[in-house]
Amino acid sequence: MKDPHKVLLYPVTTEKAVRLIESENKLTFVVSPDATRNDVKRAVEVLYEVEVESVRTERTPDGKKRAYVRLTPKFIADEVASKLGVI
């Protein structure tokens, strides 16, 4: 298993990311380019003590890799985001 601190580089704090937190219970992170969906899932669950429902990834035009992490309904993304300083 990869080191969770090396998988998740930093949270995204754009308006779209905040909207996803509030409307879809999703957190957005810039992740390591070689991280898989399972790596991202494990890292979020270990670092923030939540359960992850799904992970979607994308490559941005500038070459970074972004992960959209949906939490299970029993966890609230707002609470995790406030701990991260996103909201």
Image (spheres, rainbow, N blue to C red):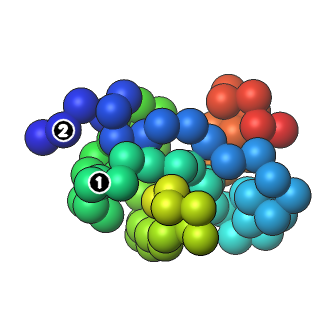
Q: Which residue is mark 1?
A: 35
User: Residue drawn 27% across and 61% down?
Assistant: 36
Q: Amino acid at mark 1?
A: Ala
User: Residue drawn 61% across and 55% down?
Assistant: 28
Farthest residue to the right: give it. Answer: 15
User: Residue drawn 74% across and 65% down?
Assistant: 20
Q: Position of residue 45 (x, y in %)?
A: 37, 43
Q: Is residue 69 left or right of residue 13?
A: left
Frontmost residue, 27 versus 62? 62
As drawn, 27 above or below 4:
below
Quarter of the rendering occupied by the N terminus: top left
Tell me if I can see residue 68 in this picture.
Answer: no
Q: Is residue 38 left or right of residue 73?
A: left
**Are the residues flagged by discs 2 and 1 in contact, CB closer than 8 Å?**
yes
Frontmost residue, 33 versus 1? 33
Q: CA distance from mark 2 to mark 1?
A: 9 Å
Dot 1: element: loop
User: Residue drawn 87% across and 58% down?
Assistant: 15
Quarter of the rendering occupied by the C terminus: top right
Q: Amino acid at mark 2?
A: Lys
Q: Position of residue 34 (x, y in %)?
A: 27, 54
Rendered image: mark on residue 2: 2
- Which corner quadrant of the image does residue 46 belong to? top left
